[in-house]
Image (cartoon, rainbow, N blue to C red):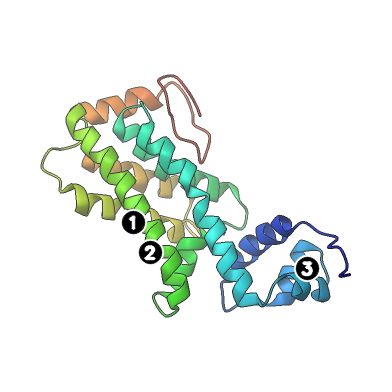
Amino acid sequence: MGRKKSFDEQTVIKAAIAVFSEHGYTGTDVGLVCERANIGRSSFYNTFDSLDALFLRALREYTASGTSLREELRTGTAPTPTLIMHRLGGQLAKQCEDDKRIGCLSANTAAELGREVDAVSTILDPDRQAWLEAYSIVLERGKVEEHIRPDIDTKVHAELIYSVLAGLRIAARVMPADNIQAQASAFIEALCTPEGITALHNHLAPRTYAPGHLISTEGSTQ
């Protein structure tokens, strides 16, 4: 009989996500993952075929974690500009709270590898498409609410939201947090009608928001 594993695979996946986010795909080796997860190399290779296999699994699980956030974005009842601000501003605030400001594994991987690795693209492409669909739904709803400018191209601006967040995640690794938030706010206001800007400011003014969480109902901080 094989030896029973003495560690939780999810603990290793979580450690791998942190290490790959911090050091990148090419800067990570098995030793770094084992050290972060507090396991031995033999335990690692008894569970995972290779570092590459672990990287792909970590990336899949990381992107899968966005499913609930997309659902909150699609079904949120706060004004559309507020939902977008909480998506961008909340994620960026969460990143800036981390001393290392590691940021997003998906954005970091895309910046490092581009489309060089097919297996990576097969993970990142559907994830990006899912976000674009969610942003498109929110923007269309914002037009109906008359909070989002009627002249914007929904498809193009959904892509722009995705690109702006990815770019600000990279910038947030080195720039002051206030500068990053100001850029996110300026971008979102540029999408808004005057009524949308008012709704955004009125909804955010009385409260702060928890980084990484969207306002899903009026008066909620979740």
Q: In which quarter of the image is residue 100?
A: bottom right
Vertical side of 154 occupied by 36: above or below: below
Q: For this rendering, which residue is in front, 103 or 106?
A: 106
Tell me the element at label 2. helix
Could you say where residue 39 lies in the image, as x and y percent from the top left? 82, 66
| Residue ID at (54%, 56%) | 62
Query: Which residue, given by chain and number where applicable, does mark 3 sit on?
Result: 35
Q: Residue drawn 58% across and 46% down?
A: 97
Whether the residues at callouts 1 and 3 have beta carbons within 8 Å, the answer is no
Quick one: SS at disc 1?
helix
* Residue wearing tag 1: 129
Q: Is residue 30 left or right of residue 162?
A: right
| 3D distance between C-alphas at marks 3 and 2 | 31 Å
Residue at image coords 37%, 32%? 75
Q: Of label 3 and label 2, which has the lower sequence position?
A: 3
When asked about the image quadrant of residue 134, the answer is top left
Q: Which of marks 1 and 3 is nearer the N terminus?
A: 3
Left or right: residue 86 compared with residue 64:
left
